[in-house]
């Protein structure tokens, strides 16, 4: 069984927050432990903040390695001008750089890529990446293809436009991850940084 942190847990929220918040929390809780606990136990209370220190280090590492806002904005602008072939090549390079095996599927199907890594199979649909509106129907097709292939999950990529509320709920309930906005730009920039 694979461990997955709840997205609303304190540690998940701190990982998404600026790194200094975790370190400030360590300082405040350590001071409270020293001030409120007996002298013999104050060190134990301060030591209890160690998980927050670790989370702060992880958040700092992630944020230090994350692309700048200017690079993300530039990637968004580039995505609007790319043809399908360039976008597909960039996605394939990004997934290969992340350690996935990538197989391109024939045009016209519900999925465009099959991704494999660590015994897991994902189907990715990216052909409608420039569409203005994204409804439930392409997600239904992707979900049906996932069931036929026995895939453990799916990816639906979009560079512009947005999903309808029904489509977002459908994706969430069927194990389809929607990759858009800064997440999509970050995926492509990470691959460019490794080349």
Image: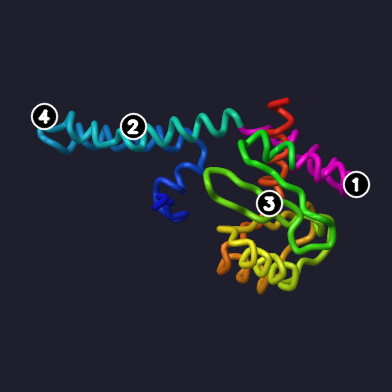
CA–CA distance in space, label 1 to label 2:
50 Å
Residue in the picture at 75% in, 64% down: 110
Nearer to the camera, 170 or 102: 102
> Can you say which quadrant of the picture contains the C terminus?
top right
At label 4, counting other C-alpha atoms closer than 10 Å, the crowd grade (few under 14, some 14-19, many 20 or more) is few
The residue depicted at 68 percent of the width and 37 percent of the height is 96
Side of 4 where 168 appears, left or right: right
Dot 4 or dot 1, earlier in sequence: 4
Instruction: Single out the mark in the foreground, 1 or 3.
Output: 3
Q: Position of residue 81 (x, y in %)?
A: 90, 45
Residue extending furthest toward the top: 195
Which label number is shown at residue 114? Answer: 3
Looking at the image, is mark 1 or mark 3 earlier in the sequence? 1
Q: Which residue is mark 2?
A: 27
Q: Is 161 situated above or below 183?
A: below
- The disc placed on residue 83 is 1
Circle 1/circle 3 CB separation < 8 Å: no
Q: Tell whether position 35 is magenta.
A: no
Q: CA distance from mark 1 to mark 3?
A: 21 Å
Q: Secondary structure at mark 1?
A: loop
Q: Which mark is residue 39?
A: 4
Secondary structure category for the residue under label 4: helix
Q: Nearer the viewer, residue 54 or 138?
A: 138
Question: Which stretch is magenta?
Answer: 66-91
Q: CA distance from mark 3 to mark 2?
A: 47 Å
Mark 4–mark 2 distance (CA, rounded to whole Å): 17 Å
Residue 1, position as x, y percentages in the image: 39, 53
């Amino acid at each position: 069984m694979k461990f997955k942190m709840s997205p609303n847990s304190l540690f998940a929220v701190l990982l998404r927050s600026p790194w200094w918040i975790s370190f400030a929390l360590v300082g405040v809780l350590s001071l409270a432990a020293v001030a409120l606990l007996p002298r013999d136990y104050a060190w134990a209370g301060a030591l209890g903040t160690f998980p927050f220190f670790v989370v702060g280090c992880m958040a700092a590492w992630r944020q230090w390695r994350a692309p700048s806002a200017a690079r993300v904005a530039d990637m968004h602008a580039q995505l609007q001008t790319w043809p399908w072939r360039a976008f597909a090549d960039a996605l394939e390079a990004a997934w290969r750089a992340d350690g996935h095996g990538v197989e391109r599927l024939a045009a016209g199907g519900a999925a465009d890529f099959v991704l494999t890594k660590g015994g897991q199979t994902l189907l990715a649909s990216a052909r409608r990446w420039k569409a203005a509106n994204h409804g439930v129907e392409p997600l239904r097709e992707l979900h049906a293809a996932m069931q036929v292939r026995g895939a453990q999950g799916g990816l639906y990529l979009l560079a512009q436009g947005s999903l309808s509320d029904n489509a977002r709920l459908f994706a969430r309930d069927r194990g389809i991850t929607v990759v858009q906005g800064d997440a999509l730009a970050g995926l492509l920039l990470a691959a460019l940084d490794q080349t």
